[in-house]
Each structure stands twice: as C-alpha cells, then as structure tokens.
Image: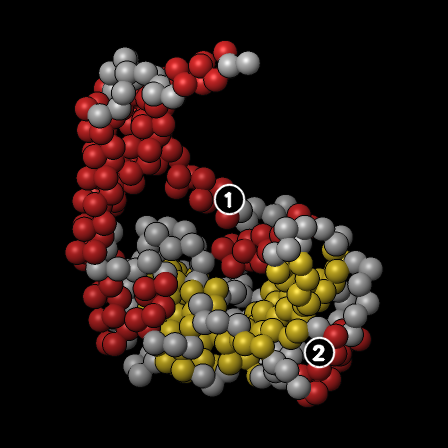
C-alpha cells in the first residue's frame, strides 16, 4: 500500500483554517452591511472584503507564530547557508554551492548535459479556435536523482525532485535533433490522449513527484498518442540542473534522513526549489521575504478589506440604479 501523502491532501489540510476564517469573515461582513443594500451587492462586498481580511489576518497569525522571523526568517536562512549551521528538524534550509551527483549523472536528452535533474518538452505551435497561439507537446518528461550541494563549509544531500526556478532553454541545431531522435527511438513512452485534459494530467503527475517524492529517484516520459513527428519537426526545450554547476537549493531539513526534503512542515515549504541563479532570486521566487515585507503585506491586505467594508456601509446604494432603466426598456414597443 502506498501511504505517501498527496500534495492535495497536504495543501487542503493547510487551507482548512483559512477557508473557515474566510467563511466567518464573509458572514460577519454580510451582517454589517445594511439590509437596504441589494442582496447581490451585499454578497459581492462580503466576499471581496473576506478575501482581503482573511488573508491579512492569517498573515498576522503567521507572523505571531514566528513565520518570517527568528530561525524561519530570510536573514537566518542566509546566515545558516553562509556558516554551514544545520537547522532544527523540519525547519527551512538554504544551501548554495556546487551540484554533485551521488551516482552516475543523468544525461539530459536534448542538450546532452550531465545533470542531476531535467525536464524536457518537444512541441510545436498551433492556433486554437480563437486564433490564440498554443503549445502542443508531442514528447515530454522528466528525470531526477538524489544529489548533493557542496557548500564552502558542508555537504547538503538533497532527496527530492527539485522545482527548477530558472527558465527553460530552447535548443535548435542538428546535434540537439539527433539526441532528441535517439531518445524517441529508445525510450518507452506512456501514450497520452491528444486532448488538453489528459496533457494537464501529466503536469499534475510531475507536481506530485515534486511535492511528495521521498527518495529523489524519479523518471516519467510521455508521448502524444497518434502523433509520429520526428524531432526535426518540433521545437526542443529543456530545463536542467547540471552536475558541477553552482546552484542554490531551498527546502526543509530532515534530521532523520540527513537531507533536504520536500516535506510540508513548520517550515511552510512544499517541495524543494532550486536554481542556477543567485540565492536572492531563489528566495524571492519562493516567497521567502523579510519580516518587514510580511508585516507590510498583512497591513495592506487588511486595510483593503476594511476599505471595502466602509464602502459597502457608506456608499453602496439602497437599490440597483439601473433596474428602473431596464423596466422602462421592456415597456418600449
């Protein structure tokens, strides 16, 4: 039996208190708004105000529990990364250094780069019914394995499929086409029905691996059913975490496993994020901001919600202003 928790279950568990707060605030605002205001306006104002107020209050609650401050702060993450200090179990950890494969490196199928993780997509462009340009994948997939980040003072093992935050790179040219054709001939692909829903399902499979993988080993490859195009007819795109590259990794520290893992715990992180860019970019893209920025955001969200309540109480009309106009129009011949 697979007892691995799903990402949906983890996220839902974390969202239940926020949803309960949202419902309570929405009801409270609805009762505060005068009954003379049309029901549709009262509901709209209540929902809009509840969104901002509940997000603001939940941010204050997170700050009160220490999120964004102390050992969970951005400054603490950067300090520990510089000194090599190991955080407590289930706390956030940042590591910057050289990526090392713990076994034989993977070889990215399009670029041929030796790496510890890759995601690829062989696709073409088309137009939908509204003449919008859309990407149609024909062959796509990913692979990842455990790796280490050798920092200036320590080695941090990573047992997770990382969410790579740097941009995918397109590879034109005959060498990339030859490598891509080679994997098309040799790989065993899972066929996917040529409809958007089925394709999106493979994205969720990848996300599930990123959020819940427990050992760092994973590999999935898909093919659009009934489409036999060769690599030379397709655009070739790939994202890799190269072995030997300088990179930053952000995740949760597991003392029991002695590794950076994707567990959702008091760190507040789901999954492990990685980039070949600077650590500052990784922290920003992962939502790891300073205590001051969290506080400012919480205040702004709460004030917007309070402003909506004030507007609903003091400005909203006691009838729909255009209702009479519609009635007049209906009486016209």
Establish if 310 lies above or below 250.
above
For disc 2, the marked residue is: 180
Determine whether, in the image, residue 152 is placed left or right of residue 159: left
- Dot 1 falls on a residue whose secondary structure is helix
Establish if 317 lies above or below 244.
above
Query: What residue is at 28 percent from the left and 13 percent from the top?
Result: 35
Q: How crowded is mark 1: few (under 14 residues within 10 Å), some or many (20 or more)?
A: few
- Dot 2 falls on a residue whose secondary structure is helix
Query: What residue is at 39 percent from the left and 70 percent from the top?
Result: 249
Q: Is residue 126 visible?
A: yes
Q: How many labels does the image show?
A: 2
Closer to the N terminus: mark 2 or mark 1? 1
> Residue 240 location, x and y as percent?
53, 75
> Residue 195 location, x and y as percent?
72, 51
Determine whether, in the image, residue 250 is placed left or right of residue 133: left
For disc 1, the marked residue is: 8
> Residue 201 location, x and y as percent?
64, 51
């Amino acid at each position: 039996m697979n007892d691995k928790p799903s990402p949906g279950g983890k996220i839902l568990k974390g969202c239940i208190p926020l949803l309960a707060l949202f419902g309570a605030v929405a009801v409270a605002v609805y009762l505060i708004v005068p009954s003379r205001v049309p029901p549709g306006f009262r509901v709209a104002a209540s929902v809009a105000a509840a969104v901002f107020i509940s997000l603001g209050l939940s941010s204050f609650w997170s700050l009160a529990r220490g999120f964004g401050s102390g050992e969970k702060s951005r400054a603490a993450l950067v300090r520990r990364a510089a000194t090599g200090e190991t955080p407590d179990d289930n706390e956030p950890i940042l590591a910057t250094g050289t990526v090392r494969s713990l076994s034989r490196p993977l070889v990215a199928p399009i670029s041929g780069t030796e790496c510890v993780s890759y995601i690829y997509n062989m696709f073409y462009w088309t137009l939908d019914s509204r003449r919008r340009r859309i990407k149609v994948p024909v062959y796509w997939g990913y692979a990842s394995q455990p790796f280490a980040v050798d920092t200036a003072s320590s080695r941090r093992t990573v047992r997770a499929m990382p969410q790579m935050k740097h941009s995918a790179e397109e590879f034109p040219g005959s060498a990339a086409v030859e490598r891509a054709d080679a994997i098309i001939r040799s790989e065993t692909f899972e066929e996917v029905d040529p409809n958007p829903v089925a394709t999106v399902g493979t994205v969720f499979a990848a996300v599930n691996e990123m959020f819940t993988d427990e050992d760092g080993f994973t590999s999935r490859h898909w093919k659009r059913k009934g489409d036999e195009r060769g690599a030379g007819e397709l655009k070739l795109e790939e994202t890799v975490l190269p072995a030997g590259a300088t990179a930053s990794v952000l995740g949760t520290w597991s003392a029991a496993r002695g590794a950076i893992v994707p567990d959702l715990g008091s760190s507040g992180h789901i999954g492990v994020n990685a980039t070949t860019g600077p650590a500052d970019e990784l922290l920003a893209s992962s939502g790891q901001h300073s205590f001051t920025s969290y506080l400012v955001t919480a205040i702004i969200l709460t004030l917007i919600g309070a402003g909506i309540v004030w507007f609903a109480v003091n400005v909203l009309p006691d009838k729909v202003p255009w209702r009479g106009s519609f009635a007049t129009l209906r009486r016209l011949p």
